Image (cartoon, rainbow, N blue to C red):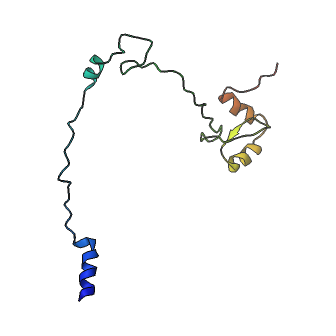
Amino acid sequence: MEKNSSVDSLDISLLARPFRNPNYKAQPRRNRNLRQIIQNDPVQNEPSKFSYSSIEAPPSVLPQPKYCDVTGLLAIYTDPKTRLRYHNKEIYGLIRELPSGADQEYLKLRSSDVVLK
């Protein structure tokens, strides 16, 4: 019987656990609407700085993503012969089977075609 009492003392399922913390106190909410944000915006009168009321932003420092010329998916590779961008090896096989001149049509859609004079 003593073994059961020691096991019962170690059993955490028998401990009383309240659902909520009795010491928890909710913080007051600070929700503001757009008018309050704009009125309290200290940078509103300075056009050179960015704020909630200005929509201008500096250009992105990330490089532009390159998309596959055939599927429109994210292009990881570029064919060195035709300069077409492609997503995977299945598309590469399709690019290799294109008739002559079709690659220039794809490049023309991307505005990267070569015009020989």
Apparent side of residue 49 relative to residue 16 in the rendered image (left or right) = right
Which residue is painted at 27% across and 17% down in the image?
39
Determine which quarter of the picture holds residue 81: top right
Q: Tell me the quadrant of the picture where the N terminus can be found.
A: bottom left
Apparent side of residue 47 relative to residue 24 in the rendered image (left or right) = right
Apparent side of residue 116 relative to residue 14 in the rendered image (left or right) = right
- Residue 90 image point, x, y percent: 69, 50
110, 60: nearer the viewer: 60
Determine which quarter of the picture holds residue 14: bottom left
Which residue is painted at 57% across and 27% down in the image?
61
Which residue is painted at 72% across and 36% down in the image?
84
Count of all numbered marks drawn on residues in the image: 0
- Residue 45 image point, x, y percent: 36, 10
Q: Is residue 64 above or below residue 17?
A: above
Q: Is residue 115 above or below residue 104?
A: above
Q: Tell me the quadrant of the picture where the C terminus can be found.
A: top right
60, 102: nearer the viewer: 60
Apparent side of residue 3 relative to residue 45 in the rendered image (left or right) = left
Determine which quarter of the picture holds residue 75: top right
